[in-house]
Image (spheres, helix red, strand yellow):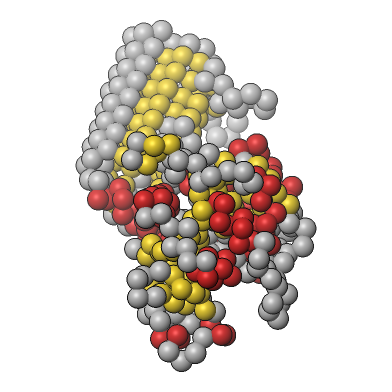
Amino acid sequence: MIIDGEDKLVITVIMAAGKGTRMKSNKSKLVHKIYDKELVKRVAEVAKQIGSDEIIAVVGHMREQIEEVLGDSVKYAYQDELLGTGHAVMQASKYLEGKKGKVVILYGDVPILRKNTLENLVIKSFKNKEYATLLTAMYDNPTGYGRIIRDEGGNIKAIVEEKDANMFEKDIKEINSGIYCFDIEELLSALKLIQPNNVQGEYYLTDVIKIMNDKGLKTGAVIVEDNTEILGVNDRAQLELLTRVLRMRINAYHMKNGVTIEDASSTYIHDNVKIGIDTVIHPNTTIKDGVVIGDNCEIGPNAYIRENCEIGNNVKIGNFVEIKNAKIGDRTKVPHFIYLGDTEIGCDSNVGCGTITCNYDGKNKNHTKIGDRAFIGSNVNLVAPVTLGDDVLIAAGSTITEDVPDGKMGIARQRQTNKDRKE
């Protein structure tokens, strides 16, 4: 990470060894998804976004599933016995030995932490020369959380768990999120001193704070502005809650940037979507990861814009339309009941109701290309691979299997015959 022009070493450790039994699933909790992306993958991505030099995932239960999701983008440490958060970090120590910098501690089931929040935590830790910097939150009702005890200088004096807090400590509103930024060398030193002196017989990472304070080392905190960022997933209800939180966060971002969303509660816009100003998104619309939509477009209602789509300016995507891996030029209309897969359409074209691209032959996905100012009649099947030129007209009800040159009309349907009903 570059801070004040200097390249600082940052390593991130992701806790990913828990069993997650409350999900009631045959899969690891951490490979369940929010908006088509696994929880643990979301955490690894934010670690990468802040410029982590290395990412270590501490895995245990169902480790193979997590390794399949993260692949070789991270290194792995193994926690075969679940003996607490401190014990988990101990398993990653081999990757930290002999290094100078910071180590960030994240959790694989806390998936919607913002990049800016994490950057602020790390930057403060470096600039203030803090040996431990905690991400904390202010809760009106902090019941159940560890309380942050500060000294007069603002140092984190201790973290007191709910069951150990006295009546005065229970009134403290600042709580521990469990997300930390530590000095690597002092963390390794403190880990050698923590003991499982508790009913659970576990090594608590929170004990590191007391050890550092006893040594007179400076500690501090960053208070998160949006408490939803530190929410975790333990069961299906919480998974739905975080999906809802992320949906509203993403929708609010687009609305602030000039997009009209008529019903934010029924509009699902995934990560990394770009939408131009004055575009209107009608209800019950889903827009998948990485889609690009231009200015002054009209999308939906009941539209499904899938991956790898690029939509130009002043485009209409109407109701009950699904498009995938498609590029649509400016001012083109795709009004209703249409499927376009693996398709490129030029500018000023019109696609009639009921048209589909037959892009899959059972083995391969094939491409359809349509030029500028094309008019595709209703109920047309375009059997890929096929190319339609500029200014073509395709008669309604046609099944097109061959290319149509510029300026030509394509018609491919059996001649109508009327017979006596008694024959």
- Position of residue 155 relative to residue 97, above or below, is below
Between 354 and 202, the one lying in front of the other is: 202
Residue positioned most to the front = 215
- Whether residue 279 sits left or right of residue 167 in the image: it is left
Say above or below: 186 vs 11. Answer: below
The image quarter containing residue 168 is bottom left
x, y (%) of residue 385? Answer: 54, 17
Q: Nearer the viewer, residue 1 or 98?
A: 98
What x and y, as percent, mark residue 174?
A: 40, 75
Residue 344 lies, in percent from the top left, at: 42, 22
Residue at the image position 60 percent from the left and 31 percent from the top: 423
The answer to whether residue 124 shows anywhere in this view is: no
Asked whether, in this view, residue 328 is left or right of residue 159, the answer is left
Which residue shows up at 35% across the image and 75% down it?
A: 152
With 364 as the anchor, is 404 left or right in this view? left
- Residue 378's quadrant in the figure? top left
Q: Is residue 46 visible?
A: yes
Residue at (33, 40) in percent of width and height? 4
330 sits left or right of 305 in the view: left
The residue furthest bottom is: 167
Q: Nearer the viewer, residue 284 or 227?
A: 227
Of all residues, the one furthest to the right in this rendering is 80
The residue depicted at 53 percent of the width and 39 percent of the height is 53
- x%, y% of residue 27? 70, 56
Instruction: State the image quarter where residue 193 is shown.
Output: bottom right
